[in-house]
Amino acid sequence: MTHQSTNKVAVIVPNWNGYKYLPACLDSLLAQSIPTEIIVVENGSTDGSLELLQTNYPLVTVLPQPKNLGFAGGVNVGLRYALDNNLRYAALFNNDAVADRHWLKHLVESLESHQDAGIATCKFMTIDRSHLDSTGDTYTTWGLPYPRGRGETDLNKYDAQTDIFGASGGASLYRCAMFKEIGLFDEDFFAYYEDVDLSFRAQLAGWKVIYNPKAMAYHQIGGTSGKIKGFTTYQTLKNLPLVWFKNVPTRFFWKIGWRLMLAQTLFLGRAISRGQGWSALKGACKCLVLIGQKVSERQRIQKAKMVSDEYLWDVITHDLPPNANALRSLRAKWRKLTGHKS
């Protein structure tokens, strides 16, 4: 079922076997304080999700797909619909999340008042409201992105509106004009880090990303991806180098690249020790194949770059992610041995 939109904004929810999460998610979106079209991209579920949508949610636009297209492929179906219907903004929202009533209103206000911003992101918390999940994404000089604030219990720590490197695809708003300029999500990512890749491309093209703490949503972390053994390992080893290869300017390419290779080696070793070596090896091999296919894409992205290298170096984080304990230990030993601070 589809409906011709009369709104300037839509919220796109990719769904794969999210039957038990969908009602809370959709009820929170239908209760938003500004008019919006809700679009569910039904990603080939086999758990009765489509029947639930057709029976209980007649006001929701449903775009059924014959198979699971992943997060990137799924949201792109919704984004093409939004672009075809000349919408101004399109939000992405996880099927295992619920939104505060004014979540969308605050994000729209951010983009309305900051015309140089292409993305607005929110304060994303755990479903029980005990921890932060994300207050915007960062990208580090180690080629490792991380969600700012994840796991922290001080929910009021990040209460200042600010520019941030990137936005979580789980609960953020995007300017449709930006997609027309930089393209949609890279479907080779399937899931994980496609939102970091898109934020990186946005930054390179001169679009800012803004964090609005007044916009709040709550997330059941891993509600979908946790269903598949080895899935996160495979996607991580496959996708992290793709973000680096496509987006990092030549000036910093190897400065970040050698650190990322060290991190990938540690990830691979850890995966093997946890019995997920095959998933990790498959991911690493698939990554090499994809990198070979993305040379021209990298050239196109870098040629279209609208910001200086200095600007980019300033907006990325010059440290390791907070939870990178093994790498921190290695770095400390290296510094002690050599006296270097790299």
Image (cartoon, rainbow, N blue to C red):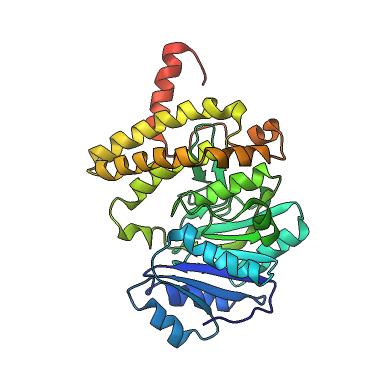
Q: Is residue 57 above or below residue 215?
A: below
* Foreground pick, 342 / 153: 342
Q: Where does the image place residue 144, in percent across and percent down from the top left?
A: 48, 38
* Foreground pick, 24 / 196: 196
- State which quadrant residue 255 falls in: top right
Q: Where does the image place residue 332, in percent across and percent down from the top left?
A: 43, 22
- State which quadrant residue 251 falls in: top right
Residue visible at 44% across and 42% down in the picture: 290
Task: Check the image and name the residue furthest to the top.
Answer: 338
Residue 322 visible in rendering: no
Residue visible at 58% across and 54% down in the picture: 156
* Foreground pick, 212 / 168: 168
Count every numbered label the image shows and give the total: 0
- State which quadrant residue 53 falls in: bottom left
Q: Is residue 130 left or right of residue 102?
A: left
Q: Is residue 226 above or below residue 98?
A: above
Residue visible at 38% across and 70% down in the picture: 44
Q: Is residue 267 left or right of residue 123?
A: left
Q: Where does the image place residue 204, in percent across and percent down from the top left?
A: 66, 42
Q: Is residue 7 above or below residue 191?
A: below
Residue visible at 57% across and 75% down in the picture: 38
Residue 19 visible in rendering: yes
Q: Is residue 189 above or below residue 268?
A: below
